[in-house]
Image (cartoon, helix red, strand yellow):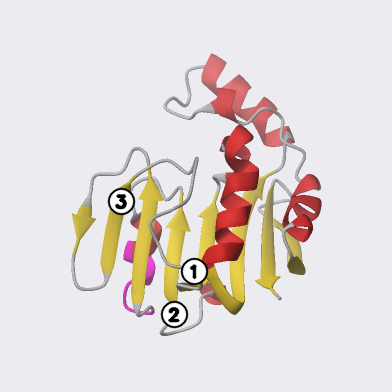
Amino acid sequence: MVISFIPSGSEILDIGGYDGSFLLKVKNKIKKGYCIDPLISPFKDDKLEFIKEQVNNKLPFADSSFDVITMIAVFEHLRKSRTIAVSEAYRLLKKGGIAILTIPDKFVDNILKILSTLKLIDGISIEEHDNYEVSETIEIFSKYGFTLQKWQKFQLGLNNLFIFKKK
């Protein structure tokens, strides 16, 4: 869903990219990509760098470093650091740059709890979702100077795609 919105030749930061798999998928499309996640194994090659770090303070990049920042299925996990992530996204994006997010609907939390209870899934940090109200995303990003470009539900309405632009 997100790949089609990534401009060719862009420099991208994937916040909360877990294992870097998204950047590996778009490697041939982008100029340079960084993934920040507290669980990632550090890695670096000519195009990609994976950095083991949490998003709870200023990230190690210069202002206006990126064309695109992605947060794929991570924003609902950030709780206390949501505003830090949005503030840093604004600082790090070039003028006209975009932030792309996917956020599951809070109804998904109930589905995941049932599947976990039935031992059909494991390893998902359900407790971190905290029934996040997806519609609050627009207000949070607007407060930091972003404009909403797109909000689209997908996967039978269980997931949300947001694209915000830095003014």
How far, Cα to Cα, is label 3 from label 1? 18 Å
Q: Split into 4 quadrants, where in the image is the C terminus?
A: bottom right
Which residue is identified by label 1? 63
Q: Nearer the viewer, residue 61 or 131?
A: 61
Indicate the position of residue 104 as horizontal and vertical percent values. 65, 44
Q: Which label lies toward us, 2 or 1?
A: 1
Q: Split into 4 quadrants, where in the image is the N terminus?
A: bottom right
Q: Is residue 1 visible?
A: no
Looking at the rendered structure, the kind of residue marked 3 is Ile
Indicate the position of residue 16 as horizontal and vertical percent values. 45, 47
Horizontal side of 101 relative to 54 (left or right) equals right
Q: Which range is magenta?
A: 24-29
| Residue for point 78% across, 60% down | 142
Looking at the rendered structure, the kind of residue marked 1 is Asp
How far, Cα to Cα, is label 2 from label 3? 19 Å
- Which comes before the other along the chain, label 2 or label 1? 2
Which residue is identified by label 2? 10
Which residue is identified by label 3? 51
Mark 3 neighbour density, 10 Å: few (under 14) some (14–19) many (20 or more): many
- Which comes before the other along the chain, label 3 or label 1? 3
78 in the magenta segment: no
Instruction: Pick out the residue farthest to the top.
Output: 117
